Amino acid sequence: MTENTNTLDQVTFDRLRRLYIIALGAIAISLITSQILIRQYLADQEDDSRLVNVAGRQRMLSQKLNKEILLLSLNPTETRRRAITDTLFSTKTTWEIAHNALQFGDEKLGIEPGNSPEVTKMFEGIEPNFESIIANTDVIIQLSRANLPDSVAFQQATDQVVSNSAEFLSKMEQIVNQYDFEAKQKVESLEQLELIITLFTLLVLLAEFLIIFWPSAKAMKASIHELLEAEKKAIKMAKDADLLSQAKEKSVRELRALSQAMDQILLFARISPDGHITHIGDRFAKLVKFQKFNQNAKFSDVLSPLENERLTLDRIISENKKSGWQGEIKATTPGGDDLWLDFSMIPFHAGEISELIIICLDITKRKEAQLEVQQLTRESFEEKMQQQNVISRQIIENQENEQNRIAKDIHDGIGQMLTGLKYLLESVDLSDGEKAETKLEKLKELTANIIKGVRTATFNLTPPELKDYGLVPALTELTQELGKLTGKEIILMNKSDFNQRLDSLVEINLYRITQEAINNAIKYAESTLILVTVSHSSKILSITIDDNGKGFDKKTIKPKPDKDGGMGLTFMQERIKYISGRLFINSSPQKGTKVTLNIPLV
């Protein structure tokens, strides 16, 4: 009898084992199949995300390309233009690589080839705009590197790029939307497949319950051994439940302590999904001056007395009560002060109870600092624009004054002397030898004065020595001529025997700055000795203009030009900045003035 029972138990056990293996195998196959399909879809989704990212970046690169081309059209300095041209070439290359990768794939960018027919057709539509932009950008780069940014071809190429960019951006937006639409279709297919797998798994579980678990339960009820084991397990579960209850009480106490700490440290509150307060921390209540006995108040009414701010907060709560929200919001305290909050809203569900947890940080001081920086930046820009307008007006006025001065010198000086020369020539009577000799002497003196006036007028324009021989010979001629004309002792010392030729713009600006410094020493400093020193090293050329005049207080120098003047120093600073040099002025009352110019030679 015992052997028959053991044999029956063994047969039952073997049958149940086979059924369990079949059931678990079916579930395993279902899970493995679902995981393989889901991983495949996730890989496709990752490729789609990369495509959308690269396609979106194409729009940004197109706008960056436009910006750099427009910067070149503003005629920047040569150094700046070269930097912008190099950046433009890099942007164009990156843009072109990404465009080809979107159509044909690129292993480096992780993009597989093979677009849908719709996307391929869209790329065929955008290709003329892309090729036009690339071709005209190459023209712009070539003209910029050839120092022809003001040419008609450069402007025509710029216009073509700008006109094609707008259509390119519009079509690229359609391509990005198509990529996004195709990705969403794949997600929908994945959801349908997942539903099918879930239904299949449920059917397998149902079949297992009817075929395996239900008969097994009947067999277990008939087994005394299993009942005894179940009793032991029940006793153990009771003990575990007791321990779990104790752990739960401990967790509740810890959560209560944490809640109190959050109330004291953070701006913390809990509200219902319709926006009414269920709890508010002490610190938050103190900040907004909220009386806790009115716990059912609306959160937006407590946070701001202004209707537009309340409506904004109600809209945020209504639209994001399921998903949560994080960002900056502006509120107003009962005292009327602005209150900026870093606002975080987190949905919380406990059974059937739903709440929104609000955690805020007071960022009012930081926001005020940001607004102040923006205001200062705007004021600085306006001030620079005003300064530039003053400089432009003064430049035009000085040019006009210089032209009038030259005309006046020629008319009042050379012109009158030529008229006198004409009358003297007409009045010479060769029959009266003594009077004729006297008039000839006057004619020689008048002729010498005319020659001197012509030399002075032409010298004040552009000295021929500067163009023919370079900076040092031109400065030598300048000091000698000004010394003769003014009677001042003006000495030039070339300490390091500098004889290099520089760029023509560098030489003329250095010459004009030195001329301005010497003229200031002559006109305003009442100096008797002016020393101009030239020295250089392998990297720097230095020119120093030192006088023994009455000097001045540096605090009285106008830092910026205005309508009343102050343009001499400004022109010197603008010229030295244009050639990437530096200007230093040292002076004090009755101790003379020293002006130093430094420019790089490499």
Image (tube, helix red, strand yellow):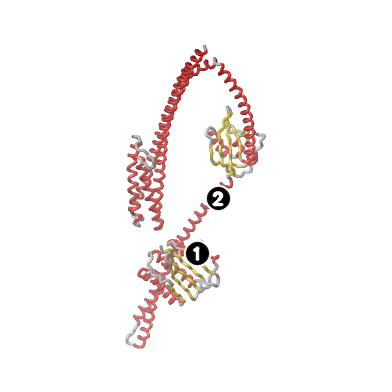
State which quadrant residue 25 falls in. Answer: top left
Q: Secondary structure at mark 2?
A: helix
Q: Pointer 1: what residue?
A: 566
Q: In the drawing, does residue 554 fall left or right of residue 467?
A: right
Q: Nearer the viewer, residue 440 or 430?
A: 440
What residue do we see at 60% from left, 24% from top?
236
State which quadrant residue 22 falls in. Answer: top left
What residue do we see at 37% from left, 67% from top?
501
Q: Earlier in the sequence, mark 1 or mark 2?
A: 2
What residue do we see at 55% from left, 69% from top?
588
Q: Pointer 2: what residue?
A: 372
Q: Secondary structure at mark 1?
A: loop
Q: Nearer the viewer, mark 1 or mark 2?
A: 2
Amino acid found under the numbered disc labelled 1: Gly
Q: Position of residue 86 (x, y in %)?
A: 38, 53
Marks 1 and 2 close (CB-CB < 8 Å): no
